[in-house]
Image (spheres, rainbow, N blue to C red):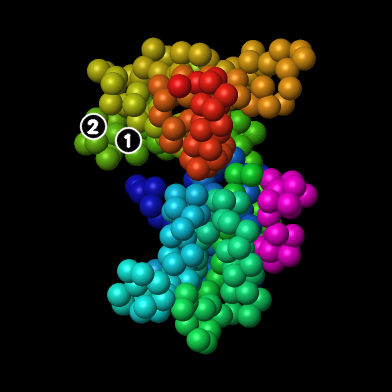
Amino acid sequence: MSINNFSVIQCVDLKMKELLRLAENVASSRATVLIQGESGTGKELIARYIHAKSNRSSKLFYAINCAAVPEGLLESELFGYEKGAFTGASARKIGKFELASESTFLLDEISEMPILLQAKLLRVIQEGEVERIGANRPVKVNVRIIATTNKNLRQLVECGQFREDLFYRLNVIPIDVPALRERPADISMLSQFFLDLSCEENNLIKKEFTESARKKILSWDWPGNVRELRNIIERSVLLSPSALIDENNIMLPKHTRSKSSGMHLLNPGMTVAEAERALIIKTLEFTKQNRTKAAGLLGISIRTLRNKITEYRKQEVIL
């Protein structure tokens, strides 16, 4: 059993099965794919599934998180540079687009790409060429681009934060990944899959859920989606002293968020900015100031969260 067999994705939900059929049908084309969905739904897994089903599968899969790389370094990482292009450029550097030629390149969190680099990406898609920083001529590349985002790019286009022409170039094959709470059959199936996987990976005896444990798992709306489910199931496996995992071993966050809750932070008369600020502060408290976890739960990038924190500090809202 392996979760890293990217040619297979575990699901029983009909919407997910239809999504995978679409992904497989377009896998061998050169068409760009835009995968949208909440954080933790498995967008990168689907991108890797497309690569595994394509005629490029024998090549190395390339990926870069546009939010994780500092803005000043992202251009050189993507496009490369020539020796002497700037101070410190002591040798030629080949960018990720060139390295990924003849293969698949995932641009994760594409919404975080600066506008100026969006224009250069558009050229890669339209012309099939890249130009290293400091170069005199472009280099031809044959790269299949897949982009993922947990934001609504159409809304970002309307706000002027994302290029409209690039959006349409990326959105040739749109794939919208449903949240885990929208596919309860997959919650049950994946719970069992992660249970068996965790036992195997940790060399433990085979364990089983009690009925009360299964009910507790289904009662949670999994705001962190599949990623959160896997983490909590693995924790229950490691902390359960017996072969039976009961509801007490399913350690959900103390401030439970049932399927019917979620409005307790909101008060009539609050502005959207105030509601957003309250949610961010509460989420940081919930994760004990772990920004990576907070950003994942909020469905935003770490960079966006960092900017919000800086803004609130200026307002003396949080320290």
Q: For the C terminus, which image quadrant?
A: top left
Label 1: which secondary element: helix
Horizontal side of 80 relative to 201 (left or right) equals: right
Main secondary structure type of the part rendered in magenta: helix
- In the image, is residue 21 above or below residue 263? below
Name the residue located 68 percent from the left edge and 55 percent from the top edge: 162
Is residue 29 or residue 105 the one in the foreground? 105
Number of the label disc, if any, that sits on residue 308: none
Horizontal side of 61 relative to 26 (left or right) equals: left
Residue picked out by circle 2: 204
Label 2: which secondary element: loop
Residue 147 placement (x, y as % from top left): 58, 58
Residue 203 placement (x, y as % from top left): 21, 36
- In the image, is residue 166 above or below residue 12? below
Residue picked out by circle 1: 198
- In the image, is residue 232 above or below residue 88? above
Q: Which residues, given as a range, are shown in magenta?
A: 152-171
* Disc 1 + disc 2, Cβ < 8 Å: yes
Q: Is residue 283 visible?
A: no
Name the residue located 49 percent from the left edge and 37 percent from the top edge: 306
Residue 278 is covered by the magenta coloring = no
- In the image, is residue 246 above or below residue 107? above
- Badge 2: how crowded within 10 Å, few (<14), some, or many (20+)? few
Name the residue located 59 percent from the left edge and 68 percent from the top edge: 121
Mark sitting earlier along the chain (1/2): 1
